[in-house]
Amino acid sequence: MQERLTPFEAAPDTVRAMQEFEQHLRHCGLEYSLIELVKTRASQINGCAFCVHMHTRDARAAGESEARLYLLSAWRESPLFSERERAALAWTEALTLLAQTQAPQQDYEALGRHFSAKEMVELTFLIGAINTWNRLAVGFRVAHPVAKDDLPWAANG
């Protein structure tokens, strides 16, 4: 994959503003584990390898289990996610696939059972932010870092 351009080099002020927004969202009151699950799930849907790599790494570093990360794309069929997480993941999928889902009432109602109005807004901004990052990374073909240990065929020679 050939990187098309480097967003930070092309528009550093805008990228910095987005990074500052990310810092706000990180400290908005939502649980860090939930933030990383949401970011990872949206990135899976959008096929953003850079962001999946980053957010699964960050989640593991913060103590997230491998099992939950492996099962995130199948969260509806797994008992490893709380009702609050399920509501957030459903909302993540609904808003990430907005043209298809139109944010169903049932997902909104489930969200309201587990989140305050402020948290619902913060979560919605979080979902919007990760979708923006996904579009930058996928659109400009930003590659995730690769360590030699990540390449099984390179380990033998």
Image (tube, grey):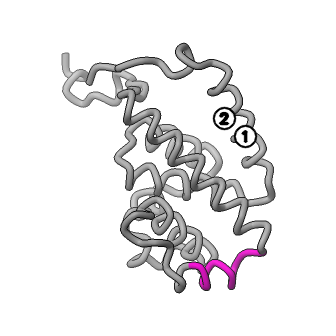
Q: Three-letter amino acid code at disc 1?
A: Phe
Left or right, 151 with respect to 68, comes to left
Tell me if residue 151 comes above or below residue 127 in the rendering.
above
- Main structural element of the magenta stretch: helix, strand or loop? helix
Which residue is label 2 attached to? Answer: 18
Assign the C terminus to one quadrant of the image: top left
Specify start and end residues of the magenta stretch as a single range.
108-116
Rounded to the nearest angstrom, the CA distance separating label 1 from label 2 is: 5 Å
Vertical placement of 75 versus 27: above or below? Answer: below
**Residue 75 spot, x, y in % from top left:** 43, 71
Q: What residue does disc 1 label?
A: 21
Q: Amino acid at mark 2?
A: Met
Secondary structure at badge 2 equals helix
Q: Which element type, helix, strand or loop, lies under badge 1?
A: helix
The residue lying at 49 percent from left, 52 percent from top is 40
Structural crowding at the residue carrying mark 2, measured as other residues with C-alpha within 10 Å and reported as few (<14), some (14–19) or many (≥20) = some
Residue beneath the point at 75% across and 40% down: 23
Q: Are marks 1 and 2 in contact (CB under 8 Å)?
A: yes
When the figure is inspected, residue 12 is found, relative to residue 43, above or below; the finding is above
- Residue drawn at x 35%, y 26% is 149
Q: Residues within 10 Å of mark 1 (few under 14, many from 20)?
A: some
Q: Position of residue 87 (x, y in %)?
A: 58, 76
